[in-house]
Image (cartoon, coloured by chain):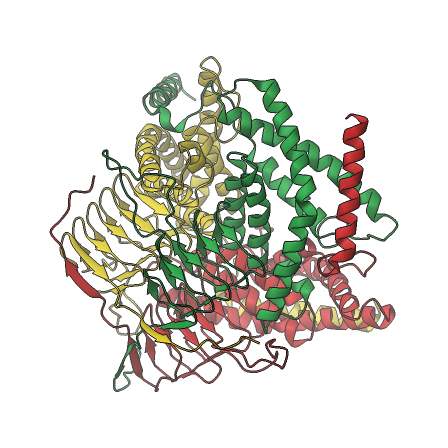
Chain colours: A red, B yellow, C green
Amino acid sequence: MSDEQRAELDTITHNILTSYARHEISQRIGEVFLPSRQRIVEILGEVRQILFPGYFGHKELTQENIKFHVGNLLSRLEQSLGEQIYHCLCYAEGGEDTEPCREKAARIARGFLVQIPHIRALLALDVQAAYDGDPAAKSIDEIVYSYPGYHAVTVYRVAHELLSQSVPLMPRIMSEHAHSVTGADIHPGARIGKNFFIDHATGVVVGETTRIGDNVKIYQGVTLGALSFPKDERGRVIKGLQRHPTIEDDVTIYANATILGGETVIGRGATIGGNTFVTESVEPGATVVPNAPSLEVRSREKDG
Amino acid sequence: MSDEQRAELDTITHNILTSYARHEISQRIGEVFLPSRQRIVEILGEVRQILFPGYFGHKELTQENIKFHVGNLLSRLEQSLGEQIYHCLCYAEGGEDTEPCREKAARIARGFLVQIPHIRALLALDVQAAYDGDPAAKSIDEIVYSYPGYHAVTVYRVAHELLSQSVPLMPRIMSEHAHSVTGADIHPGARIGKNFFIDHATGVVVGETTRIGDNVKIYQGVTLGALSFPKDERGRVIKGLQRHPTIEDDVTIYANATILGGETVIGRGATIGGNTFVTESVEPGATVVPNAPSLEVRSREKDG
Amino acid sequence: MSDEQRAELDTITHNILTSYARHEISQRIGEVFLPSRQRIVEILGEVRQILFPGYFGHKELTQENIKFHVGNLLSRLEQSLGEQIYHCLCYAEGGEDTEPCREKAARIARGFLVQIPHIRALLALDVQAAYDGDPAAKSIDEIVYSYPGYHAVTVYRVAHELLSQSVPLMPRIMSEHAHSVTGADIHPGARIGKNFFIDHATGVVVGETTRIGDNVKIYQGVTLGALSFPKDERGRVIKGLQRHPTIEDDVTIYANATILGGETVIGRGATIGGNTFVTESVEPGATVVPNAPSLEVRSREKDG
């Protein structure tokens, strides 16, 4: 590199540093460091090993070695989960009070381990719902091992538990990881009942304040979203209100339906057809079907 | 860790073990172990290196070294593919008859290698169809190297071949991996003709019993899915029937169209408009267009 | 392996080599080698570290070490970016004129570094737009760290800069990588104004010749695509025309709307409802709403 080029590189460095000072919004220099996304993704992997023994991680499990195996996994998970929860709490409080944070983090990590059998019980129902609801499913194993919808629901149930224990940032990092891998974006704040099945998964969005009952089945591309947001005097949306729909028990929602609004209730046993746009409540047992598209018959043109 | 905490952790471990016994559906303790998802994904990578020499893997290929290079890759692939097919067969038969399984696996792996030129011939047509059909494509290389739709079709053609040789589990693991990477979920059981092109790919679903002719082009978000499922006396769907549409030659299906049902036939040369919901057959040469959305002109409100 | 099996493997190898000769379209034997996709993805990671210090990569940054840290990153990035740009140029020119290529590549890499503060300024506005527009966003950090839409826009702004400096292949490889990770497919050729926000991101497609103004917000599943393509006498689409819509300032487009055509202009301040299919221009301030779906109330059937 010539002297001139080196000087130019110094100028570039200087300008970038100036940009950090000018646009503080997207830099974290001299601040408490963020929890590690990569470690949080690894934690999800460890949780999956405990939830589904013999599927993920060590495979040659027997009734003899399983106790030792799980004990080991739990110790490691408690450690790594506690560490990252600590960073999340610490981050949320701006780096103050590190000792109470550390104790609180350990308590929450332990509390999460206690909930694992409960999460497993829910996931056992979910996998059965997937098997019963999908004629293409050849076995339970295929679902646990490779269905993106089931993976997304698994991560949701884990992230929802952590959110309910008031862990900041981590639940959302988990759910966005699952979103990237599965195409389904389920906010950890949503409340979802038993026997939930998402088929194909790509493009599904379940918003933060959505409520879903038992035995609900949704297909790819379904959005349960917000309709509009009350704004404050500065024109910014007010956060924290119920903005997403309520889906009662036994509802099926077909591909690419968009259901919006915090006051929208899809009644028990209703069926929502594909490609519909629903912003009003639907009676229990009703079926919403899209208008038939127009059919235009043309003499066939030679293509090329 | 205090004694009390240690005792608590023992209780947690115990409860998780109890949960394994109670919900056997999602554990595989003491069972034949599953084939390795990671190894199967690696096999896909090796297959791609053979299908597209010079694109993936070793790049400095010449007419001199190519024979040696391919011979090497084939030996390794036959080994690793045979090994994982063996685990798949073994798994499907519950661990019985390991020697016949091993021989059968070797036979299938060899049979797959034999089909590679045939798969390449199909993929050469597919890449040309992509180039001809997409004005944004600057070169064939760009498509092979980076188009998700082409990647999804590649994995489909490989997985379909393995499924047709009755390999359990592996084809679905391959297609769900491609689904995760590309956003397109093509079931390996679908039958797809020549010159197939999926543009953009995200959200595409092609169901297990779909039949697609030659020269078909589909866009992002298109679902070729099931309409409803006959159920048995326990209310569970009956598996194995034709549930997905038939798409004849020369059909184009635009973004986010949903076409459902095993008796739905989209006739030769038809065009299906975007965001339509089609559950009945369409005549050859016809064009299905969505109903025009309503236009409501409001005085512009100041936003914020 | 028996002699017979070995002979068979030789035949298979021979047939694959023959297939390379027959279908040259998908092999690159004896050609200039392609730039490395993996290295280009790593470059994106390095760029992110410079754009968002303290979020990605090294985290314990202070006002003291930041200058040294950035200087270091820039040197490395200039090196690796220059190297891959060189391969892209070399590839595009078929391997000729390597020395001028190398100099040109170095010049472009340097030119990209110069633009970093400008890119940061745009991204600072984009993150604020995301925060203001999404009630579920708890902090700016959450958006930078985990929002797929923001990630896609970040990669777009980087890839667009490289494309505007006429780098072949690399911008598309970057955008398809972001597409795979985020579900949003933004062509690097699109022109996008300030304060751009994509919520949820999965299934979004923004075509090559799209123009988007300031303060535009789009939701998951939105397509800004081409309607049809003029074809040449051989029936192949003509490349290079304006094929995608123009979206003026202050427009909001809801989930799964499909807007097509190079002459389609969505006027300033318009709102496009979800699941609509729009192929004609929309007046400024207008609202396009989907037709209400049909409601069919059935006596509730017992499901199973």
Please, is residue A233 above or below residue B285 in the view? below
Q: What residue occupies the far left of the structure in this picture?
A: A299
For this view, does C233 lie left or right of residue A231? left
Where is residue B225? Give x, y as percent: 30, 60
Where is residue C63? Give x, y as percent: 86, 53
Please, is residue B297 above or below residue C297 in the view? above
Q: Quadrant of the N terminus of chain C?
A: top left
Q: Residue at x 57, y 40 (%)?
A: C162
Q: What residue occupies the far top of the structure in this picture?
A: B64
Q: How many marks?
A: 0
Q: Nearer the viewer, residue B225 or A55?
A: B225
Q: Quadrant of residue C272?
A: bottom left
Residue B138 visible in image: yes
Q: Quadrant of residue C23?
A: top left
Q: Quadrant of the C terminus of chain C?
A: bottom left
Where is residue C93? Give x, y as percent: 49, 23
Q: Nearer the viewer, residue C53 or B81?
A: C53
Q: Nearer the viewer, residue C72 or B248?
A: C72
Residue B30 visible in image: no
Where is residue C10? Give x, y as percent: 38, 18
For this view, does B156 lie left or right of residue C159? left
